[in-house]
């Protein structure tokens, strides 16, 4: 009897959980460093980095579109897996942009990180790997 390992969907779900938890870990790191002590809407004008961070949230729209129009129509598991990785990477970039802006800022306002992290997690939830047979 041949040894049978986890199926493709299980592997995708494990990766999804790991990447979603990594976004939360960024927040823990910022909090431990004292960079995200409070949340408040910034009153000063946006710097170029802060503006880029907010604009990066639009990348999640790409993941929504990929999921809705491309991934759901593909039945081949390997192609779905590749597209899931692309979507999760885009979501990770959104969270990382918020992390970098919050880390580089002089204040302890975690607004940009939490805005981007929330958007990235919503993107990850939208691209939760589903079994193509169902």
Image (spheres, rainbow, N blue to C red):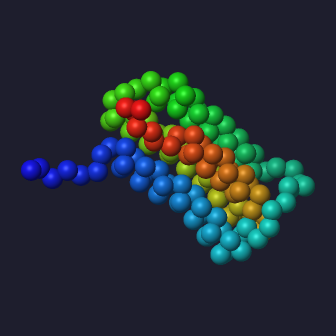
Q: Quadrant of the C terminus?
A: top left
Visible residue check, residue 79: no
Q: Is residue 101 above or below residue 88?
A: below
Foreground of the two, 53 or 91: 91
Q: Residue 27: image x %, image y %?
A: 64, 64
Q: Residue 49: image x %, image y %?
A: 72, 50
Visible residue check, residue 33: yes
Q: Residue furthest left?
A: 1
Relative to 56, 17 lies left or right: left
Q: Is residue 81 above or below residue 41?
A: above
Instruction: Write the residue at 37% across / 32% down.
Output: 133
In the rendered image, which quarter is residue 109 located in? bottom right
Instruction: Write the residue at 37% across / 27% down.
Output: 75
Relative to 24, 31 lies left or right: right
Relative to 51, 27 lies left or right: left
Q: Residue 94: image x %, image y %?
A: 61, 48
Q: Residue 56: image x %, image y %?
A: 66, 42
Instruction: Write the residue at 54% across / 55% down.
Output: 20
In the rendered image, which quarter is residue 123 located in? top right
Q: Residue furthest right?
A: 43
Q: Is residue 3 above or below residue 34?
A: above
Instruction: Write the residue at 20% across / 50% down.
Output: 4
Q: How many marks?
A: 0
């Amino acid at each position: 009897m041949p040894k049978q390992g986890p199926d493709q969907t299980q592997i995708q779900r494990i990766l999804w959980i790991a990447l979603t938890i990594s976004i939360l870990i960024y927040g823990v790191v910022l909090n431990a460093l004292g960079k995200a002590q409070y949340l408040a809407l910034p009153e000063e004008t946006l710097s170029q980095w802060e503006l880029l961070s907010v604009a990066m949230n639009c990348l999640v729209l790409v993941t929504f579109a990929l999921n809705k129009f491309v991934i759901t129509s593909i039945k081949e598991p390997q192609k779905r897996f590749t597209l899931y990785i692309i979507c999760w990477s885009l979501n990770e970039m959104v969270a990382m942009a918020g992390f970098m802006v919050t880390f580089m800022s002089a204040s302890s306002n975690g607004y940009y990180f939490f805005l981007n992290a929330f958007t990235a997690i919503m993107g990850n939830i939208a691209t939760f790997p589903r079994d193509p047979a169902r």
